[in-house]
Amino acid sequence: MSALVQAAIDRFGESWTLAAFGALVGLAFGFFAQRSRFCLRSAVIEFARNQRGGKLTVWLFAFATAVTATQALAWAGLFDASQARQIASRGSLSGAAIGGALFGIGMILARGCSSRLLVLAAQGNLRSVMSGLVFAVTAQAAWTGALAPLRETLSALWTVDGGAARDLIQRTGIGHGGALAFGGLWLLAAVVWARRQRVPVWGWAGAIGVGLAIAAAWWGTWAFGRLAFDPHPIQALSFTGPSAEVLTRVLFAGDRPPTFDLGLMPGVFVGAFLAAALFRELKLEGFEGGASMRRYIAGAMAMGFGGMLAGGCAVGAGLSGAAVFTVTSWVTLCAMWAAAALTDRLVDQRPEPRHADPQPLPATILPAGR
């Protein structure tokens, strides 16, 4: 594998090789996320309403797989997250808590987190196209624009040093073996629940694919950094920063060298589009009224600012960051769950409207008698 990567670097350069890898990982993520209906919002709603539809199990499969696979690589000495931004740099606990809560509120209002919006947009959902654009603009404003001062003020309220202070594995002393066992237990729980709920094949298999894409991104960017001459960040999948970056490049910075994130975003879109096309699920959908549009816009703005404040979205913190056990990512994930459940109770405690996302799990692969 190292020889193949080195050959690609020699021929295409480091930046284009890394962007191509990001596109491949994104392609896999988009395909499996579309087929499994992976969505944190769906999982939270099902849990909060005490329902048994399999969506929580799908999310748990993705989460447990990401943790287990990533920690297995670390335990085997094939990956080291110590230099990843989520661990090495100084973090913000206030940003994680406040930003995670805002993101959780936003994903309920927008009927999907940032990754789910991108997947739905690839299927032809115009509500998600508009919401995704608002999300990216708000994230960019929070990164370097008008909302940046507010983000910096909130982030400075409670900070934590980088290194061991942000690493839950070091703080708890469980080691990579303990973290691997933790992920394995939740993966076993997902298997048991999937059998009881008769989750269809694409539900659990696609979710496992999502989790493996996270681990592959961690390992691939780490391995690439060991071969490359120029420094490149160790990273996995996230959608807040990359959305803002792609928007910036499209509007006024197209001459910058490509990055992993620049390959990731179109890769996810293409992967989801291919999955929807292969299974005949491409369908144009729009808004059904002004009230609905206001809700989506408000949700997208809350997610854009919250995700940038927290330093990660439902995938960036909920899967990628959690898989390497960074303190701020776990705070963000917990805040997302709590705020989303509360928002659902206050705003949406009624049956889902017919147009609402996420889609049900594919009926064509339900077991007989369902």
Image (spheres, rainbow, N blue to C red):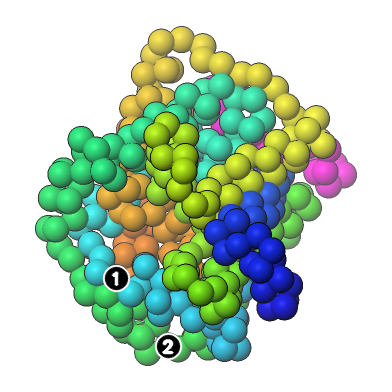
Looking at the image, the residue that sits furthest to the right is: 368
At horizontal 20% and vertical 35% (from top left) the residue drawn is 146
Residue 80 x %, y %: 49, 81
123 with respect to 366 (left or right) = left
Q: Is label 2 or label 1 in front? A: 1
At horizontal 21% and vertical 43% (from top left) the residue drawn is 148
Q: Callout 2 environment at 10 Å: few (<14), some (14 to 19), or many (20+)? A: some
Residue 204 seen from this side: no
Q: Quadrant for residue 331, please give it.
A: bottom left
Residue 237 on the magenta segment: no
The span from disc 2 to disc 1 (Cα, nearest Å) is 22 Å
Q: Secondary structure at mark 1?
A: loop
**Residue behind mark 1:** 89
**Residue behind mark 2:** 174
**Residue type (three-letter) at the residue carrying disc 1:** Ser
On screen, residue 271 above or below 165: above
Q: Earlier in the sequence, mark 2 or mark 1?
A: 1
Residue 116 x %, y %: 55, 40
Residue 369 on the magenta segment: yes
* Predominant SS along the magenta part: loop
